[in-house]
Amino acid sequence: MSTTVQEAVRPAAAPPPATSPTDEALAEEALAEEAPTDEAPTDEAPAGAPLRLRWLLLAVVTGASFLDSLDVNIVTVVLPAVQRDLGAEFATAQWTLAGYALAFSLFLITGGRLGDIHGRKRVFLAGVVGFTLASAVCGFAPNAELLIAARLLQGLTAALMVPQVMSVIVTLFRPKEWPVAFAVLGAALTLGSVGGPLLGGLLTGLDLFGLGWRVIFLVNVPLGLLITALAARLLPENRQEGPARLDLPGVALLTAAAFALMYPLVQGREQGWPAWMLLSVLAAPVLLVLFARHQRRRHARDGSALVPPPLFARRSFAVGLAVTLLAFTGIGSLALILTYHLQYGLGWSVLRTALATAAWPVGIAVTFQIAWRHGMRRGRLFVGAGAAVMAAGSLLLMAAVRTAGADLSWWQVAGAELVVGFGMGLCSPVLASTVLSEVPPQDSGAGSGVVNAVTQFGSAAGVAVVGAIFLAATGDVATDVLDPARIDRFCSATGATLWYNAGAFALTALLSRLLPAPATDSSSDSATKPAEGAPA
């Protein structure tokens, strides 16, 4: 299973996109796995349960997705406050963002398969309980090391609970009820995405009970406990018929490759780039080759590969993954750089930063419906246009930072963010469906999981790469002394770093020409059509 709803609502670690990439692919995957019908409900497909109970259960499972969406976005604007309070290095901020997305991406597909094997209720409850406990640890973490470990645990447990949500919806409700159910889920995700930065800024600014930034994590605890209690009492058990196997060696190899690359990028400068870190970077592609060979053998033996090799037989899918990865390296890192520039470089408050960056999801909300209603058969066009608009927004932000300097105004930041949001709203809702449009229906579930894992990994990798560029240009970001020389250094460094984001979006727009062409017949039309009930 995967989280496509999420990609439209959030790029991990970025100021929230209003829907994280694409619900339609997740819906396709859930439908491919569940294939429910309008036949009389059974114990495994309790669509005949009382209407009131079904909508209560919908509120329970969408509450879990809301927590995930909220927690990704609520943390972005408070990272400087976290760093100050813990006396931590800049790498702590990078890991706080990238660690969650990385763990989520690595265990996303496995989390869905665990639900198939052990029952979706059981795995959902394990995910919610784990997420709640990890949130409490984040809130009370006395040092950066424990905070990072807890964020990794949050990402892992989110990968257990989120994939079960779509399966629960398609088994609880009849097909004619899916549109409303998916709309409720989409609204919950959008609320978490849009409200996350604002809530984070407000709670941190209020300094409730003297807890400061810690409240943004502790707010998850009562919500998590409520979801756990209701799900344990009301949610029916459901699992996939037939055998399902886990590819744990594949997960281990992919995790090793990801950390071999990510750890040096995040920690390298602060530790002086020792020789073993350079060897680690060189080891990453070797581990990826070993992973690919393992996947081919596993698929040939029993078809249980984590990433099925036949997906890559279609060039459009391989190119689509590259486009997705590139786009989300730019999306996932933009919030980190902007937040540090505004708070450490210019001395803005957490709340003022949150209010300015809230223009991003507003922009998404404006164009999202256009893409959702008209972009599914013109995916290549919408992806290219959206990426070009995001590149333009990044250039506007760069120009404002460089020219205004210390006098950068709220409206200049919000205006550039609004343009980036316009582009995200055009691109995000159709990206995954476009990448998957030539994948056979029987492989759509696996393909959806891979696309969403790549999306999350792209966000994590972007935070690592852009964070390294930014830190190299600014030097020590932790001091609160604001003087003209420091402001000039931050403006120069932020402007230079934003070239990466603008370049990533521009290259995404160029590469979008290699995505599958618009549908011209009924068969391809059905392949690109979003699953019924995806959030509107």
Image: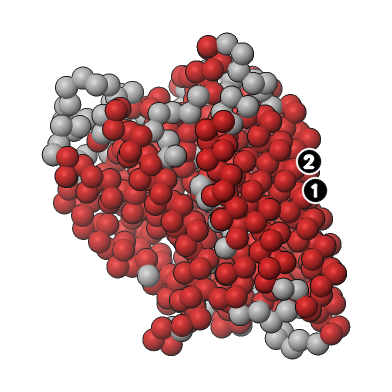
Residue depicted at x 64% and y 48%: 422
Residue depicted at x 33% and y 23%: 35
* Marks 2 & 1, CB-CB < 8 Å contact: yes
Look at the image and tell me in which quarter the N terminus lies. top left
Relative to 202, is 192 above or below? above
Amino acid on which the number 2 mark rests in the picture: Leu
Q: Secondary structure at mark 2?
A: helix
Query: Dot 2, crowdedness within 10 Å: few (<14), some or many (≥20)?
Result: some
Q: Which residue is mark 2?
A: 507
Q: Quadrant of residue 438?
A: top right
Amino acid on which the number 1 mark rests in the picture: Gly
- Left or right placement of residue 454 versus residue 70 in this view: right
Q: Position of residue 12 (x, y in %)?
A: 56, 54
Q: Position of residue 186 (x, y in %)?
A: 42, 45
- Left or right placement of residue 269 versus residue 247 in this view: right
Query: Dot 1, crowdedness within 10 Å: few (<14), some or many (≥20)?
Result: some
Residue depicted at x 66% and y 64%: 414
Q: Which residue is mark 1?
A: 503
